[in-house]
Amino acid sequence: MDRVTPPAAPPLGASFLRLFAVQASWNYDRLLGVGMGVAEEPLLRGLRGSGGDGAAYRAAVARGAHFFNAHPYLCGLAVGAAARAEYEGAPPEQVERLRAALCGPLGALGDRLVWAGWLPLLSTAAVAAIALGAGWGAVAGFLLIYNLGHVALRWWALRAGWDAGAGVVGALRNPVLQRTPTLVLPAMALVAGFCLPLATRWLVRPFPLAGALGCAIAAAVGVALLRWQPGRIKSLWIGLAAVTLGLAGGWLWR
Amino acid sequence: MSAGTLVLLLAWGTLVGIDLVSVPQMMIARPLVAGTIAGLLVGDPETGVRLGVVFELFQFDILPVGAVRYPEYGPATVGAVAAAHALGGSTAWGIGAGLGLLVGLFAGWSLHWLREANARAVRRAAATLESGDIRVLARLHAAGLARDVARAAVVTAVGLAAGWLLVRAGATGLPLRVFTLTAALAGGAALAAGVSGLLRIVGRGASFRWFAAGLAGGVAVLWIA
């Protein structure tokens, strides 16, 4: 493939906005692939003129929509890097390999940083704040702070991918990205621990003694079952069983 | 509940439903947010926040990694809040939680059906996709989003209709002890889900020591307060 000069002002904004809907057509065949192709397309428009008939552009769009799986907040890194690699004249197989190589690291990093770090950190903090009387202001604070991190991460990923192109692996070694989980994960664990006694007290407070006892027993039995058979016994089934028992018990207990 | 409030709840539940996966993943799908806003919409913020916290605890037991299947608690929380409010507000949240859990289960199945429908559409368009036709790609993507909007609306409507049926069936006349016991046991189950889920996320080693330190801090605050 020929090298094509990338646009001086790449339409990163259009691509960035499309990345918010990258999972809109999530499916079991290509997972995020179709959404990735849609998000990458604005960055590929500079290739339209390169082959005269737009063949390079169409081939790149088709490649962009192939199978892809990663954390949705970080897949901008692959979008930017793959688009830049197309301008750099990377052979199609290399672009495919680049995308495939990014799936695992971006998925693992995003799951660790966001799903197991940033999100439970702020969510448990919000629950603790509510238990301490903060009311719905805690929910507003959760949304605001969470999304500052969310939007910043999405933008950084796209920008870093576009800047690095095929050398994107270096961007993943960014010290901030490497160090953040080592701060977020302990903070999440600390706040999660802090939240639980407060949430328990807040949930139990309106009940009379018998109700509080019932709540404690249900919690103890539930934890024992969930820890005994992790993955096999689901918390949803325990919840449904608890409500059914409550209905039956309340009806019989006269 | 007025027709206008029902329409607002339906719209809110739909937004919550599409936020989970499709767009924009800004976490309005978290039960804490979905429930609080639903509570404000029905004029019963206390029930909204309470059910929001209950389902948030259930949500901690779910880690949305890869193609794993899980219940969806966002629109379910909206239905739970509407039902609990219609049944008597803060005393009836246990029944609302039960209804929400059922809706969450149904919503989880609907996500699986949606993904299969999207996969079928992709298979049908595979040849044109390989030609790099952006119009086909965009249409496919937009159709996936439209399916999710419809799915989220149906799930929310099912939750709201189930609440309405409970009221019509005379559930408002249940004795107070039924409301109390269902709430107590549902609260216990939610705490179990929260503890189990958070322990799984925290894991062992250094993180667990931080967790234990936080636990001690929480108990100390309760002691002082």
Image (cartoon, coloured by chain):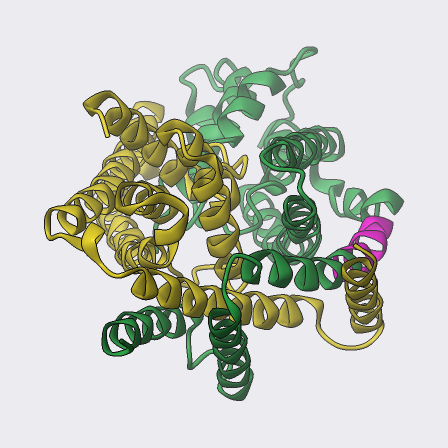
Chain colours: A green, B yellow
For the point 62% across and 53% down, the residue is A115
For the point 67% across and 18% down, the residue is A5
- The majority secondary structure of the magenta stretch comes to helix
Query: Which quarter of the picture shows residue A7?
Result: top right
Residue A171 placement (x, y as % from top left): 79, 42
Q: Is residue A183 magenta?
A: yes
Query: Which quarter of the picture shows residue A95?
Result: top right
Name the image quarter holding the N terminus of chain A: top right
Where are the magenta residues, as a range? A178-189
For the point 86% across and 43% down, the residue is A176
Residue A239 placement (x, y as % from top left): 39, 69
Residue A49 located left or right of residue A254: right
Residue nearest the observer in this picture, A109 or A148 = A148
Residue nearest the observer in this picture, A10 or A190 = A190
Residue B11 located left or right of residue B34: left
Name the image quarter holding the C terminus of chain A: bottom left
Note whether residue A47 is visible: no
Residue nearest the observer in this picture, B89 or B200 = B89
Residue A6 located left or right of residue B206: left
Residue B168 placement (x, y as % from top left): 11, 46
